Image (cartoon, rainbow, N blue to C red):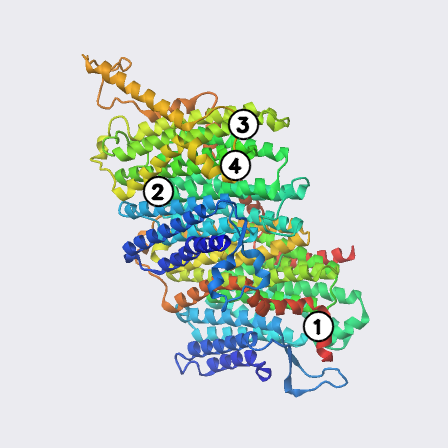
């Protein structure tokens, strides 16, 4: 396994260049190659999760060993938390790619699409595997630049506008991130995350580092689209081609935003009470305001996009409560429960939001509209889309036995256990409004009268799209099983333990 | 040996009411549409089995078995499958006398409705996947009742909201709006229940209902109780969370209405209310007062709304709400008599209300009409439906000797007993009694409209020839009607001692009441009346024209029961209230919807999508965070 660590980055990059160079000569190369590559990266990440005891591995590129315990090479870090993220990224990427096989036929420039998608996945895998801040930054840029291009893929007026906004705001975030990485480098004289941890731990609490932390929250918060840094998301996620929306909402905001925040603030920095409260507060703000914005939308993909903001709020309050508890030296069990809830919701959201965007894509593919008011009566004509989207809607609204119910349940219980009563009540309120807005989606898209005369001939989507949606709908049910103790200890708990291990985990890692 | 026998029975009950229906439900879901006949037979077979197993469980043990373990079902597979120790607390079962009775009722209604649906499916469009939804509902309801752990209960309870939504099977504008409203209200109450359960877990450290005994003295416990009570109220359909029921019954097909809002949701809601009021919490006087108030309001408000309805399914929906008021009042009384009365009324209501919806389904499938104005004079064409409806209607209105009377009588007695206490809720006993009795009278008034509007008067020519429905449809209805008579007649001699006293303990009535004797006396007086009529009319008879207010008798002249009730709507006292009700001013759903959308508009106004604004937010957020850390 050790030698295979760079593969999730290398394989998609190889695919990207191959498709770009020789894609024109071999007609089906792009589709087949990208599916195969994502399949193999997905299998690799499952293998890591399933085989053995998920030990933490540091891959030293070029075999540069540390001198006097000071790392000099570029490290890649594979531990249960990054393994968990790898599974999510590559699964959603695989299913989106399979879905695209049919979907992308309505665009030209198919090879560019697969090239950009492969680069994006390579970047995402790089972000979660990166062991030093600079590589993290580089992979982050790889991801977001390819997603700028993918958002603009339709090259209509709206799409270009969305992409422009995304680029400008992304640029602000990038400069904040790069600036604070520079500051950290200036202060600690190193870029390796474990080494930085060691230096920071020795030096104690410094105002400069807190300054950097805030800029990192703003920078990565913008990538994760938490309020008030969310301005780009509704446009970008609704304008992109649907499989890309599924990637952006399902994976990119998590891997490029939340993952990094969690990783840096739990493992690299010393946990700090004020910062924890701040993170939880902006999480709460996103959760509440996002859902109110969502329910008023009539553009289906925009509605889904605003819900991504709101659902990211759930993930953040789950993990943020854990942060607060840990920073107050509270009980480890309570913190671990809250973080479990947060991470569980993260994987659940990836699946059901991915599926919802694919459903929206299926409707757009057949009807050519995203306006809920122009839909109706689709339940008869597109039964599979209707059934899968019902499952996903139930999952996001927290109706048992779908996965979203259980993760929200854990978050609410954890909040009550830690005496965050208001937070628990808000989580319930947001869940109810989420349910209301997805009932709106169900009603206007699939029921509400008969289908209009001009659309009597529409039929269910082609097989590849149907396949992806079915698998995701089954996942919506199957992920509930992660609650079973045996499975939870295998999948969620190791990742949670990494976070609750705090910075001691990184310090010990280097001493090993 | 005895223990072993009981656990085998329990294991069988679990297998046949939960596991097999759940699996069969999933299998039927996958079967193609064409195999409807197979689905029908399979569904009936499984519900028969579950009925049988539930009955065996009900009859097997005399004393209350409190807690059993799910693991008994896995006994044969012990070698392959080991339940982890930390799961054990979630797998305890609560099989006391109440749970056993409710499970028997759930299984019984599932059987009746599945038989009815077999006949119904030819008449009108049936909900998609009706069979599999019915079986899944059976499984989830039984599991929710078996569960002792609140967490397990909420999982199955929440799933029932989903089956409720799916059974409505919306297609047109009205039904999709109703489906949306239903699931939003039910889902919201489930969310609140989760909050309540989490608070209980925090206070008590356990989720097991058998171990819980909380007194509602501090604010947190009261909040937890209210959250759970809202869950029970919404499921059963009590004011002010009842508004989904009329919409649902108006648009859903008859089997769905008769199965969920009329029978199972009442059983579950009242079951859970009883559990939380008497097992999980010790409720204080203030909460008792609140519950009684809501109960009384539910009775009156819903029945007043029922009076003015034109759509008979909607009318029945409002009655389904109104009757919940009696059960809640009974449970809220807290005395043995009150609880027994409430539970008995729950059973009786499930019987006659389900029957009424089945009758409505028969009328609908025979005529295809929804409005009372378009119907009339069906008594000759549909005699069985007519007689059954009449029995149900008399029963719901509390006419002795039928079952509705028996349970209402117990509740009245309970209310009178309440007057002996000293709290504020005790001093108001006259109010509760008056509300309950007036509610009952108004129920009778609106059922006069129902019966006469559909079955009496002159048949509208537009209806054409009407035929009685097929036996598969009327047989379950007839059975329910017989139960109505039987439960009423033998209330004190057999039904209450054998069904309710094991749950509540011995019941002392404040006066002499022997249901069979009363039935006998009523029977004799009816016979005498008929005898006199026959004797008096056997001689000479004179036929004369009816006096119709000086008008000439034309073809369209008729006694319109519906328009008669317009006088109530237009009376000075009620007119503004009805007007407000029609504008949905009393509807929690509409009110909160408006509030949420207003807030949504407010936020949307800030989202102009102008790039410089968005960039400004980022900087503002950053500055705010700096300030937060500095201050």
Instruction: Tell me whether circle 2 and circle 1 mark residues in contact (CB < 8 Å).
Output: no
Q: Which residue is mark 1?
A: A505
Q: Does dot 4 land on a helix, a strand or a loop? A: loop
Q: Chain of mark 1?
A: A
Query: Could you tell me which chain the residue with mark 2 belongs to?
Result: B
B490 and A203: which one is in front?
B490
Q: Residues within 10 Å of mark 4 (few under 14, many from 20)?
A: some
Residue B627 visible? The answer is: yes
Quadrant assignment, res A199: bottom right
Give the residue at x 50% y 26%. B435
Looking at the image, tell me whether mark 4 or mark 3 is earlier in sequence order: 4
Residue B254: image tag: 2
Q: Is residue B209 above or below residue A157?
A: above
Front of the two marks 4 and 2: 2
Compute the Cα span from label 4 to label 3.
22 Å
Tell me if label 4 and label 2 are in contact, CB under 8 Å.
Answer: no
Q: Are marks 4 and 2 on the same chain?
A: yes
């Amino acid at each position: 396994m050790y030698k295979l660590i760079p593969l999730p980055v290398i394989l998609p990059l190889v695919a990207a260049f191959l498709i770009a160079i020789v894609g024109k000569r071999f007609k089906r190369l792009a589709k087949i190659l990208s599916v195969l590559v994502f399949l193999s990266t997905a299998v690799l990440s499952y293998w890591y999760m399933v085989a053995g005891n998920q030990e933490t591995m540091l891959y030293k590129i070029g075999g540069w060993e540390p001198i006097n315990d000071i790392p000099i090479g570029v490290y890649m870090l594979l531990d249960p938390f990054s393994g968990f993220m790898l599974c999510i990224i590559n699964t959603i990427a695989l299913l989106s790619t399979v879905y695209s096989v049919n979907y992308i036929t309505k665009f030209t420039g198919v090879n560019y699409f697969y090239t950009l998608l492969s680069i994006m996945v390579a970047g995402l895998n790089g972000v979660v595997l990166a062991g030093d801040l600079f590589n993290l930054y580089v992979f982050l840029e790889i991801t977001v630049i390819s997603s700028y291009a993918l958002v603009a893929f339709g090259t209509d007026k709206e799409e270009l506008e969305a992409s422009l906004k995304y680029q400008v705001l992304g640029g602000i975030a990038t400069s904040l991130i790069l600036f604070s990485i520079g500051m950290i480098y200036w202060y600690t004289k190193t870029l390796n995350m474990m080494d930085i941890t060691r230096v920071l731990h020795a030096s104690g609490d410094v105002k400069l580092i807190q300054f950097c932390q805030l800029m990192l929250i703003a920078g990565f918060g913008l990538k994760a689209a938490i309020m008030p840094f969310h301005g780009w998301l509704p446009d970008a996620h609704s304008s992109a081609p649907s499989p890309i929306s599924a990637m952006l909402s399902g994976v990119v905001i998590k891997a490029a935003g939340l993952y990094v925040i969690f990783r840096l603030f739990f493992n690299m920095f010393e946990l700090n009470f004020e910062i924890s409260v701040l993170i939880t507060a902006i999480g709460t703000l996103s959760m509440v305001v996002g859902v109110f914005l969502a329910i008023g939308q009539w553009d289906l993909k925009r509605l889904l996009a605003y819900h991504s903001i709101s659902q990211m709020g759930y993930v953040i309050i789950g993990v943020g409560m854990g942060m607060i508890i840990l920073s107050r030296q509270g009980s480890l069990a309570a913190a671990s429960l809250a973080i479990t809830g947060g991470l569980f919701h993260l994987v659940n959201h990836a699946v059901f939001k991915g599926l919802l965007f694919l459903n929206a894509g299926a409707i757009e593919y057949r009807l050519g509209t995203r306006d809920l008011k122009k839909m109706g009566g689709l339940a008869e004509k597109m039964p599979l889309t209707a059934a899968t989207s019902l499952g996903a809607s139930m999952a996001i609204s927290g109706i048992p036995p779908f996965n979203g119910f259980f993760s929200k349940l854990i978050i609410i219980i954890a909040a009550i256990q830690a005496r965050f009563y208001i937070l628990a009540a808000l989580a319930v309120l947001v869940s109810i409004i989420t349910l209301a807005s997805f009932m709106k989606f169900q009603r206007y898209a699939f029921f509400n009268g008969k289908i209009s005369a001009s659309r009597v001939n529409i039929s269910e989507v082609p097989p590849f799209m149907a396949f992806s949606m079915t698998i995701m709908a089954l996942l919506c049910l199957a992920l509930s099983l992660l609650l079973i103790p045996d499975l939870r200890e295998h999948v969620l708990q190791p990742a949670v333990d990494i976070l609750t291990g705090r910075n001691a985990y990184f310090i010990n890692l280097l001493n090993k | 040996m005895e223990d072993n026998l009981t656990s085998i029975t329990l294991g069988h009950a679990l297998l046949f009411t939960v596991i097999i229906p759940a699996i069969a439900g999933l299998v039927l879901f996958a079967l193609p549409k064409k195999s409807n006949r197979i689905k029908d037979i399979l569904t009936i077979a499984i519900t028969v089995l579950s009925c049988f197993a539930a009955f065996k469980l009900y009859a097997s043990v005399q004393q209350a078995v409190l807690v059993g373990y799910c693991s008994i079902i896995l006994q044969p597979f012990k070698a392959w499958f080991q339940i982890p120790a930390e799961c054990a607390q979630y797998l305890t079962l609560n099989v006391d006398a109440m749970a056993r009775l409710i499970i028997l009722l759930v299984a019984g209604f599932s059987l009746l409705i599945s038989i009815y649906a077999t006949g119904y499916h030819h008449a009108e469009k049936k909900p998609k996947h009706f069979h599999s939804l019915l079986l899944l509902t059976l499984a989830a309801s039984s599991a929710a009742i078996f569960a002792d752990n609140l967490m397990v209960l909420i999982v199955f309870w929440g799933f029932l909201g989903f089956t409720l939504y799916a059974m409505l099977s919306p297609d047109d504008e009205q039904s999709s709006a109703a489906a949306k409203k239903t699931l939003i209200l039910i889902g919201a109450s489930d969310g609140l229940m989760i909050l309540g359960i989490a608070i209980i877990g925090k206070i008590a450290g356990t989720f097991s209902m058998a171990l819980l005994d909380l007194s509602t003295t501090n604010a947190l416990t009261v909040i937890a109780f209210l959250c759970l009570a809202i869950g029970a109220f919404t499921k059963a359909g009590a004011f002010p969370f009842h508004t989904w029921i009329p919409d649902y019954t108006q648009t859903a097909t008859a089997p769905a209405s008769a199965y969920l809002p009329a029978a199972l949701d009442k059983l579950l809601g009242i079951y859970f209310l009883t559990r939380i009021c008497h097992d999980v919490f010790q409720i204080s006087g203030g909460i008792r007062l609140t519950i009684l108030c809501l109960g009384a309001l539910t009775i009156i408000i819903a029945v007043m709304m029922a009076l003015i309805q034109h759509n008979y399914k909607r009318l029945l929906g409002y009655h389904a709400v109104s009757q919940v008021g009696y059960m809640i009042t009974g449970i809220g009384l807290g005395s043995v008599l009150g609880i027994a009365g409430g539970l008995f009324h729950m059973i009786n209501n499930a019987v006659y209300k389900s029957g009424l919806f089945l009758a409505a389904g028969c009328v609908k499938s025979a005529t295809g009409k929804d409005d009372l104005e378009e119907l009339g004079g069906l008594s000759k064409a549909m005699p069985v439906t007519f007689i059954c409806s009449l029995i149900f209607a008399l029963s719901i209105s509390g006419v002795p000797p039928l079952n509705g009377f028996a349970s209402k009588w117990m509740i009245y007695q309970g209310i009178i007993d309440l007057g002996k206490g000293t709290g504020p809720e005790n001093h108001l006993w006259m109010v509760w009694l008056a509300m309950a009795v007036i509610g009952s009278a108004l129920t009778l008034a609106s059922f006069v409209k129902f019966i006469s509007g559909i079955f009496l008067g002159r048949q509208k020519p537009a209806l054409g020839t009407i035929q009685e429905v097929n036996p598969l449809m009327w047989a379950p209805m007839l059975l329910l009607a017989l139960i109505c008579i039987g439960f009423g007649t033998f209330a004190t001699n057999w039904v209450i001692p054998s069904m309710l006293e094991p749950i509540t303990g011995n019941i002392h009535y404040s006066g002499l009441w022997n249901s069979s004797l009363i039935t006998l006396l009523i029977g004799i007086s009816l016979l005498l009346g008929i005898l006199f009529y026959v004797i008096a009319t056997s001689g000479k008879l004179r036929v004369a024209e009816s006096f119709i207010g000086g008008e000439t008798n034309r073809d369209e002249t008729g006694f319109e029961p519906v328009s008669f009730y317009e006088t109530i709507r237009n009376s000075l006292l009620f007119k503004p209230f009805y007007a407000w009700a029609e504008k949905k001013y009393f509807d929690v759903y509409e009110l909160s919807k408006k509030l949420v959308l207003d807030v949504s508009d407010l936020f949307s106004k800030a989202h102009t999508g102008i790039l410089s604004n968005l960039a400004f937010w980022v900087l503002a957020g950053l500055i705010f965070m700096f300030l937060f850390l500095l201050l």
